[in-house]
Image (tube, rainbow, N blue to C red):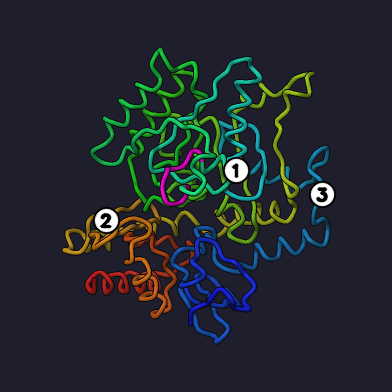
Amino acid sequence: MVTDNNSAYPIWHPYTQMQTDGTPVKMVRGEGAHLFDEQGEQYIDAVASWWTNIHGHSHPAIATAIAAQAKQLEQVIFAGFTHPAAIELAEQLLRRIPFHHKVFYSDNGSTAVEAAIKMALQFWWNLGQEKRKIIAFRDAYHGDTFGAMSVSARGVFTAPYSPLLFDVVFIDTPVKGSEAAALMQLKSVLSEETKNEIAAFIFEPLVLGSAGMLMYEPEVLNEMIAIGKAHQVLTIADEVMTGFGRTGKFLATDYCAHKPDIICLSKGITGGFMPFAATTCTQAIYDAFLSNDRAKMLFHGHSYTGNPLGCAAGIAGLRLFEEENTLGNVARIEKQHAVFAEQLSGHRNIKEVRQRGTILAIELKPKGEGGYLSSVRNTAYHFFMDRKIILRPLGNVLYVLPPYCITTHDLELVHTAIRDFVESV
């Protein structure tokens, strides 16, 4: 059944062509790595509900923490006020990011990036330096608000708004074979002629999600961060997708010796329960905003900044990393993916298989139009839905990015379905 423009259905869904994509499946319950529709059919959530649900749906520990917090304090203005859950969550995050000292809360990945961009630009403004340019990867995706779109790839996601986006210096993504060129471009941008104009370098560490799960190595990222620091450029790691164990370590930048000045976190921060985000930074960045001049405070905020329910969910989710050996499950998934990736390697219908931690991506050889709008996407999506597996291909790229609680058996079912689809195209 296709939803037409005159349908009584009242919702406009994201990244959905409402004319042709069909009636949304109504989910009524979740448990572990499974979702259940209104007919009671069970689905494997192989994409962790847009990469957010890391501990499993309706996890009782997180649900209980939110319920308890709701009975005590559900919301308080965060300008001039604070609360215990906000303080505890910040302390827990900073224990895992010991090179950072402050946490700024917001409510989603895009707003975490917006806060980071504004921190970086105002940092230099507060110091009396007119550094206003930002470096980003040519294939990047950092969100759908205007600042986040500006530092993202110019393409199908941003085309309608392109004239309104601010100028960014783009360099190649250092994927295999492009490392030397990307490093040379970064060094060139930071040459004597331009170095005093560059405020920050923003990147998705190791995996560029919406670009098709493009991957690159920690060694080149480590060198890029070092180059940025050597030229007094702030480095911003967008760990919205890669944070909270997704790449095999708690943060993707944990693979690097050199650390970013600012980190953006969201998605897994509440285990998929609540809209919430955090932007963390060094003491030096925070100190640049301390002044008797109120014009130097950070001019950024949201109505639900530091929401107590989101903080409670975040605290409970972080506790589960120890209580349920979460990173042990990450390692198990990583190993199972690696075996499957080896089995698929060299298949006639596959261009490339990529893996980092719990993220597995299979790029099919394009037939007709490639990229995000590839017709393969719809064929694949319905193929897997018919098998009660939720995958949301990025054009001709199939990817698996499951909750960490997924069983070995369920992951094998997902891998088997992918193998069947690859054989069929």
Give the mark, 1 or 2, whose residue is nearer the N terminus: 1
Mark 1 or 3: the one toward you: 1
- Tag 1: amino acid: Ala
Discs 1, 3 touching: Cβ within 8 Å: no
Query: Quadrant of residue 254 in the image?
Result: top left
* Label 2 secondary element: strand
Q: Which residue is mark 3?
A: 76
Look at the picture and state if 88 lies above or below 365.
above
* Label 3 secondary element: loop
Look at the picture and state if 176 lies above or below 269.
above
**Distance from Cα at disc 3 to Cα at disc 2:** 47 Å
Q: Which residue is mark 2?
A: 353
Q: Which residue is mark 1?
A: 112
Look at the picture and state if 246 lies above or below 220.
below
Whether residue 25 sits left or right of residue 169 in the image: it is: right
Is the C terminus in the top left, top right, bottom left or bottom right quadrant?
bottom left
* Residue under the point 78% across and 46% down: 84
Q: Count the marks: how many?
A: 3
Dot 3 surroundings within 10 Å: few (below 14), some, or many (20 or more)? some
* Residue under the point 39% across and 29% down: 224
Look at the picture and state if 89 lies above or below 348.
above
**Distance from Cα at disc 1 to Cα at disc 3:** 20 Å
- Tag 2: amino acid: Val
Q: Which region is colored magenta?
A: 150-158
Give the mark, 1 or 3, whose residue is nearer the N terminus: 3
* Residue under the point 80% across and 53% down: 75
Query: Quadrant of residue 345 in the image?
Result: bottom left
Whether residue 372 sits left or right of residue 233 in the image: it is: left
Residue 421 horizontal/vertical position (percent)? 28, 72
